Every structure is written in C-alpha cells, then in structure tokens.
Amino acid sequence: MGVRTANVQPGNIGETLESLAATIHGRRDASPEESYTARLLTDVEDELLKKLAEESSEVIMAAKDNDHDHIRYEAGDLLYHLLVTLERYGVGLDELAGELNARMK
C-alpha cells in the first residue's frame, strides 16, 4: 500500500483520463531506463500484466476494508496501469468509450 495522497480535490474525470492517456502515449518514445511507463510499454508483457492484477487486488482489499481514501488511492493506480495496458495493445479511449456506450443502449 502506498502513501495516501493529501488534499485531493474533485476534478473532471474525462479531462484527467485524456491527459493521462496522452502522457502515457508520449512515453512510448522515452528511454525505458528513465521512464517506468516506457518500461511497462516495451518490456516483457508479463510485468505489466502482473501490475494490473496486483493493483486490481489492492482495490479489492481496500474495498473489503471499507477504507474510502485507500480505495481512491488504489483505484488511481489501477486506472493508470489499465491505461498503460490499453496503450500497449492499441486500444484508444475513444474506442473504449464506444464500447461502453454500446453497452448502455
């Protein structure tokens, strides 16, 4: 478990996810030695998939503890690793939005 983030203020989730996805996309050209994100995008596939599973489990455990701040913190980690996974496999946010929109009809 990481250190909880202090002074969290509400934000616009769409803008935040788009900004984070763009940052992740930009890390494709970064040095894997200098960028954790670049390593996840280019290194052994299992390393990223292990992180995705780990962060999912941490969200579950935080929920089991009914710890609001911890759930938020771990959900942030999970969303970051999910966005890296989507970038690695070429699934854009627009495509994901289309998938979700199709399911709501």
Image (cartoon, rainbow, N blue to C red):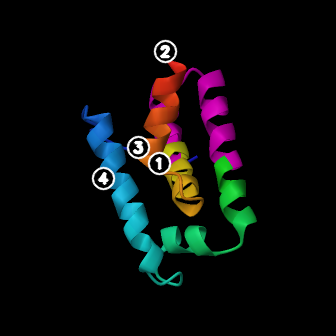
Amino acid at pointer 2: Lys
Query: Does residue 70 lie above or below 36 as drawn?
Result: above
Amino acid at pointer 1: Val
Spatial CA span between label 2 and label 1: 40 Å
Amino acid at pointer 3: Asp
Query: Does residue 73 lie above or below 80 as drawn?
Result: above
Residue shown at 59% from the left, 67% from the top: 40
Badge 3 or badge 1: first in the primary sequence: 1
Q: Which residue is mark 2?
A: 105
Whether the magenta-drawn stretch holds residue 66 is answered as yes
Residue 38 image point, x, y percent? 51, 73
Spatial CA span between label 4 and label 3: 13 Å
Answer whether labels 4 and 3 touch (C-beta < 8 Å).
no
Badge 1 or badge 4: first in the primary sequence: 1
Whether the magenta-drawn stretch holds residue 97 is answered as no
Q: Which residue is mark 1?
A: 3
Spatial CA span between label 3 and label 1: 32 Å
Residue shown at 49% from the left, 40% from the top: 96
Per the image, label 3 sits on a secondary structure element best described as helix
Q: Nearer the viewer, mark 4 or mark 3?
A: 3
Spatial CA span between label 1 and label 4: 23 Å
Regarding residue 20, the answer to whether it shows in the image is: yes
Q: Which residue is mark 3?
A: 94
As drawn, which residue projects farthest toward the top? 105
Residue 95 image point, x, y percent? 47, 43
Q: Residues within 10 Å of mark 1 (few under 14, many from 20)?
A: few
Spatial CA span between label 4 and label 2: 27 Å
Per the image, label 1 sits on a secondary structure element best described as loop
What span is in magenta? 53-77
